[in-house]
Image (tube, rainbow, N blue to C red):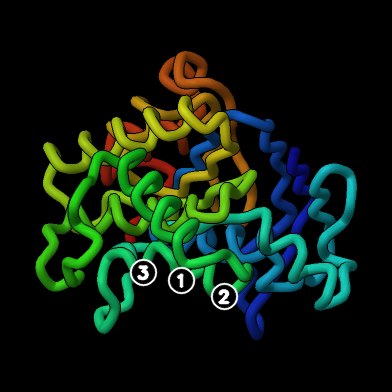
Amino acid sequence: MIKIIDLKKSFNSKKVLDGANLEIEKGKITVIIGRSGEGKSVLIKHIIGLLKPDSGEILLDGQDITKMTERELNEVHRRFGMLFQGAALFDSMTVGENVAFPLREHTEMPEIDLKNVIKEKLRLVGLKNVEDMMPADLSGGMKKRVGLARAIAMDPEIVLFDEPTTGLDPVMSDNVATLILDTQRNLKTTYIVITHDIPLTYKIADKIAMLHEGRIVEQGDVGYMKGCPNPILRQFLEGRAEGPIKVI
């Protein structure tokens, strides 16, 4: 569905992406792993057209989004949903208003239909009767669920997750992993997850890709990655300080 070809991006003199190549399959969960600061979020911003690369291509169903006009990109953005770190809910809005936000921004859906969509999306993430609550009244896990309900409100073809378990304890992280799996199986949507949470990765991934020093250094399914001898991958998956990845 998405093909990233030799993507390069520098900020000033710092190379962040240095020839990244990756294929993301339709209807699957692709997890991009790597250390903090390795460019995972920069890669995601390129995939949705928020950043332009210095060189390379990103093909979405065969069309290069790096060459698109702003109007064409606006159409592409409607195909994506996004769950940000910390859920990024609007504190001044109720849960229902948060979920409805993209629908009010991009459609003219009648209020009665809007209420039904809000209820249905919240049901999909395991919440009910929370529409009138404020984000401040929610637990961290509930905020993630509301954030996901908002991300899928417009029935996107592709949902992006930016560190979905940041700040959660292991039990809640596993709960979020189950939520990601259940909604993906329900909706048959393409999910792209960036994380350095290894238990989450092993639980949800159809495909894992490791980003290191601006390149995808290894990729494959969970079984392949667990057995792969690549020393960079092994050090990261096993959480060791010693190895080719330098800890500064």
The answer to whether mark 3 and mark 1 are in CB contact below 8 A is yes
Query: Which residue shows up at 47% across the image and 56% down it?
Result: 151
Q: Amino acid at mark 1?
A: Phe
Q: Which mark is residue 105?
A: 2
In the rendered structure, the answer to whether residue 39 lies left or right of residue 17 reads left
Q: Which residue is mark 1?
A: 101
Q: Amino acid at mark 2?
A: Glu
Query: Is residue 35 something that shows in the picture?
Result: no
Query: Is residue 169 something that shows in the picture?
Result: yes
Query: Which residue shows up at 57% across the image and 36% down it?
Result: 189
Q: Which residue is mark 3?
A: 98
Above or below: residue 199 compared with residue 95: above
Ranked by sequence position, the earlier of labels 2 and 3 is: 3
Name the image quarter holding the C terminus: bottom left
* Label 3 – label 1 distance at C-alpha: 5 Å
Above or below: residue 229 compared with residue 137: above
Query: Which structural element holds mark 1?
Result: helix
